[in-house]
Amino acid sequence: MKPKCRNCDKANLSKDETGINKKMFGEKIKEFFCLGCLAEYLEVDEEFLLEKINDYKEQGCTAF
């Protein structure tokens, strides 16, 4: 079962969304934010998070 957003209940979060949550909060987290809610929580733009996701992918991070 794919996780849902703990804030807005968006279902079926993508691997990128769960991956960036794990990078921000640790591998063992049980609750996740969707990209929009995570950006709001961290007080950053969604574009910033997308850039971070691409950076991690280019570094070979397996969370994505």
Image (cartoon, rainbow, N blue to C red):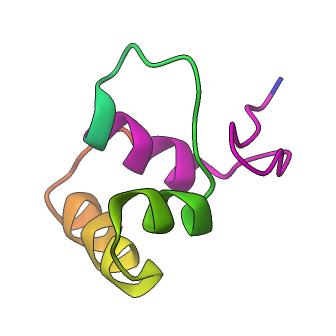
Q: Locate residue 49 relative to residue 31 in the image: left or right.
A: left
Q: Position of residue 12 (x, y in %)?
A: 82, 45
Which residue is found at the position 69% from the left and 36% from the top? 6
Residue located 83% across and 44% down the image: 9
**In magenta segment, residue 10:** yes
Q: Nearer the viewer, residue 64 or 9?
A: 9
Q: Is residue 22 above or below residue 64?
A: above
The image shows residue 26 at horizontal and vertical percentages of 29, 25
Residue at point 86%, 46% (across, down): 11
Picture quarter containing residue 23? top left
**Residue 43: within the magenta?**
no
State the count of labels.
0
* Extreme residue toward the left, this view: 59
Q: Is residue 35 above or below residue 30?
A: below
- For image coordinates 69% across by 45% down, the residue present is 7
Residue 2, by quadrant, is top right
**Would you say residue 9 is visible in this rendering?**
yes
**Can the viewer see residue 64?**
no
Locate the N terminus by quadrant: top right
Q: Residue 13: horizontal and vertical position, in percent?
A: 71, 48
Q: Which residues are magenta?
A: 2-23
Q: Is residue 17 above or below residue 40?
A: above
Drawn side of residue 48 relative to residue 5, left or right: left
Q: Is residue 53 above or below residue 27?
A: below
Image coordinates of residue 50 in percent, x first then y, are: 40, 76
